[in-house]
Amino acid sequence: MIAGSIEAACDFVLDWAGVEQALGDDELARDPSLPSAIRRLASRLGADWLERAHPFRVETHPGLYQSLFNIQDHILDPRKPTEDGSYRIILAENQGVWTLAVGRNDPEALYAAGDFMDGSEPGWRRFEACEVEDVLVYVLLSNLIWLSQYEDDYGNCGDERTDEIDQLVWSHAAFESFGGFWTDTERTCLHMEGVGVTLPRRSWPRHGRTWQDHSAKPRI
C-alpha cells in the first residue's frame, strides 16, 4: 500500500502535484493538544491553513479558493478550535452529514456524530473502527480528486478500475462500501473504487490557470 501512513499520503500528494517546496507548519507540529496524525500532517502540509498563495489552494470559481483541506470534507484549522462540550471537532463533511472529533482530554480518541459509515445517530459516539490517521489519509486523497476535477471531466473518466490500475494507494476495512484508491505503475491516473471516478494526472493549477493534461497515456 503506497499511502499507508499520513507521511506517505503527503508524499503521494506532493509527488502527484509536482510540488517540491516545504509546506509544513512547525508550530502546529509541536502542539501536544493535537492528535499525533494532525501534528504530522501539519509538519508536511500545515501551511495550507494559512497561505492564500499555497500551491494546494485553487481558485475553483472567481473569488472562491478551495484546497486539500476544505473542498469536500473539511480538515479544520487547529488554530481556530471548534469545541462541543468535551469534544474538539477536527473534520466535517461539507454539508454537515457527519462530523468527527477527538476528546479534549484524549486527542487520540476518535468520536463521530451524524451519518459516518455506521449509520446516523444523534450525539457523539466513540468510533473505534479506525484511527484519526486513517480518516485524514482518506480525506486527503478524496479531496485531491475533487479538487482536481473540472466540469468537462464528468463522463470522460472511466467508472471502472481497469487491469492496468493495479497499484493500491490506500484502503481500510472500516470503509466497507469503498474499494480504495488505486493508481497504475506510472501514476498517470488515480481511481476511487466504489465511487466510480478515474482521474487523469495533470499539472497542478496555478492562480489564473486551468488544468493541463500531462498524462503519458490517453484518458481512461
Image: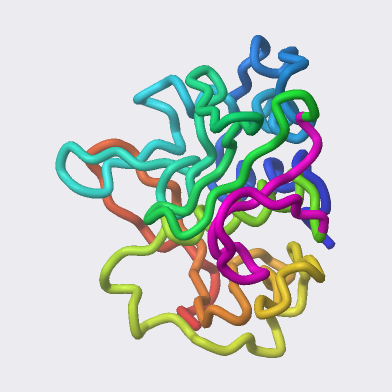
Taking the image as shown, residue 169 lies to the left or right of residue 156, namely right
Residue situated in front as seen by the camera: 145 or 15? 145
Does 194 appear above or below 81? below
Does 102 appear above or below 205? above
Residue 108 part of the magenta segment: yes
Residue 90 part of the magenta segment: no
Residue situated in front as seen by the camera: 215 or 9? 9
Q: Which residue: 60% across, 81% down?
A: 194
Residue 80 position within the rendered picture, expressed as x and y whole percent measured from the top left? 48, 20
Q: Quadrant of residue 31?
A: top right
Residue 124 position within the rendered picture, expressed as x and y whole percent measured from the top left? 63, 48
Q: How many marks?
A: 0
Quadrant where the N terminus lies? bottom right
* Residue lying furthest left: 62
Point out the stretch of residues depicted in magenta: 107-128
Q: Which residue: 53% across, 76% down?
A: 217
Q: Quadrant of residue 54?
A: top left
Residue 89 position within the rendered picture, expressed as x and y whole percent measured from the top left? 57, 36
Residue situated in front as seen by the camera: 105 or 175? 105
Does 104 appear above or below 100? above
